[in-house]
Amino acid sequence: MNTTPKSTPIHAPMTQFPVRDGELVVGGVPLTRLAARVGQTPFYAYDRHLLGARVGELRAALPEAIDLHYAVKANPMPALVGHMAELVDGLDVASAGELRVALDAGCPSGDISFAGPGKRDCELEQAVAAGVLLNVESAGELRRLADISARLGWPARVALRVNPDFELKSSGMKMGGGPKPFGIDAEAVPELLAEVGRLGLAFEGFHLFAGSQNLRAEAIVEAQRKSFELALRLADAAPAPVRVLNLGGGFGIPYFPGETRLDLAPIGANLADLAHRAEARMPAATLVIELGRYLVGEAGLYVCRVVERKISRGQVFLVCDGGLHHHLSASGNFGQVIRKNYPATIGNRADAPPTEVATAVGPLCTPLDLLAERMPLPETQVGDLVVIFQSGAYGASASPQAFLGHPPAIEVLV
């Protein structure tokens, strides 16, 4: 049996799911009973209570003047989106498919915004007809939108998505700064604002999204301040008062060993200052924070079952019925340069100490199909449930579920 190395890096504690009688509990239901209720593994489970608690935590940390929007791309499961729509002030979508989910969830069209660098004409037409706010990403999109709006006879609500001249430092994915497919370069925005006026579109504001998955509060504060100052400068050229200023998000959650949770206190203090300044400089504007991963990521688990335990040249392998085709990001193939493990455990042995180092793999014919590599785990047997934490965002919908013809993972909101 392998023993746990003393130098094994430690993940942040995963305490959001309680343990009862040795099992993780999701939404009040022990994991083995939940698996029986779902009827199969693998599956994703999202905890309603944790979703509400995260929104409540944010509401307490941020000033009341800040609107909180959920970015549907993080997890577009219809039941989850419907639940989130009741908790937040608006939804942000990135396709016509997500727009339908948002509207079906009962979110008022006036509280939905639509971003994305490659909107098709049919999507623009659907968005105009629905009356949602379109975050325009280019001059060409603006002109196509004006033609569509004129043809339909319905005014298009528009905000300009700005590609700022700075990046969100220490972010997992940089969405702004330098050459980017996202948004309009800040230096080109004043000229385009004049065109918005000439085209007769209903200008409402700006959308700035510098980056995502950041665990450094000081970097988020700096990006928010720079975004606000940039918006103030651009507002001077706007054809109408700014009504919406979307400062993006970027709030991260701890995935990997050595990472610590984001400190909300300095972010809340900074946003309170920006809201106060906006009262004087942009009195008609609502400041918006758009979050996806931070709202839902820690409320979700991915659960699969061990179908084979084998030892190869002294290394323990747990062969599971789920893998990268369901959870691409946990496999390390969704943006990681050097693969690192998500936090994981054996969900029906959750209070057992780690006694061996094991590698959990999926059923696919590729060495990339890894869920946990050389990770300290309790001794595990066939039939046990491997659990991957931090799986509420960019899981099922971000994975190649049709790969090699295996069945898709079920998603449940508990």
Image (tube, rainbow, N blue to C red):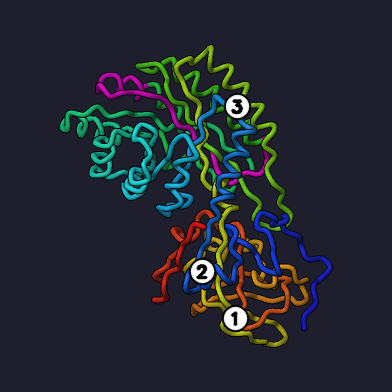
Hey, what amino acid is under mark 1? Gly
Q: Is mark 2 on a helix, strand or loop?
A: loop
Residue for badge 1: 383
Q: Which residue is drawn at 63% across and 49% down?
A: 253
Displayed quadrant of residue 2: bottom right
Q: Is residue 152 above or below residue 199?
A: below
Q: Is mark 3 on a helix, strand or loop?
A: loop
Give the CA distance from mark 3 to mark 2. Answer: 40 Å
Mark 3 / mark 2, whichever is N-terminal: 3
Q: Residue at x 70, y 69 (%)?
A: 21
Hey, what amino acid is under mark 2? Leu
Displayed quadrant of residue 272: top right
Q: Is residue 336 visible?
A: no
Mark whose residue sits in front, 2 or 1: 1
Residue for badge 2: 324
Q: Are marks 3 and 2 in contact (CB under 8 Å)?
A: no
Q: What element carries label 1?
A: loop
Q: Are marks 2 and 1 in contact (CB under 8 Å)?
A: no
Mark 1 / mark 3, whichever is N-terminal: 3
Residue for badge 3: 63
Give the CA distance from mark 2 to mark 1. Answer: 19 Å
Mark 2 / mark 1, whichever is N-terminal: 2
Query: The N terminus appears in which quarter of the rendering?
Result: bottom right
The location of residue 109, given as percent across then percent down, is 34, 35
The location of residue 261, given as percent across then percent down, is 69, 46
Give the CA distance from mark 1 to mark 3. Answer: 48 Å
Q: Is residue 34 visible?
A: yes
Q: Which residue is drawn at 60% across and 53% down?
A: 298
Count neighbours of disc 3 (C-alpha within 10 A) and say few if under 14, some if 14 to 19, many if 20 or more. Answer: some
| Image: magenta residue range | 191-218
Count neighbours of disc 1 (C-alpha within 10 A) and say few if under 14, some if 14 to 19, many if 20 or more. Answer: some
The disc at residue 336 is: none
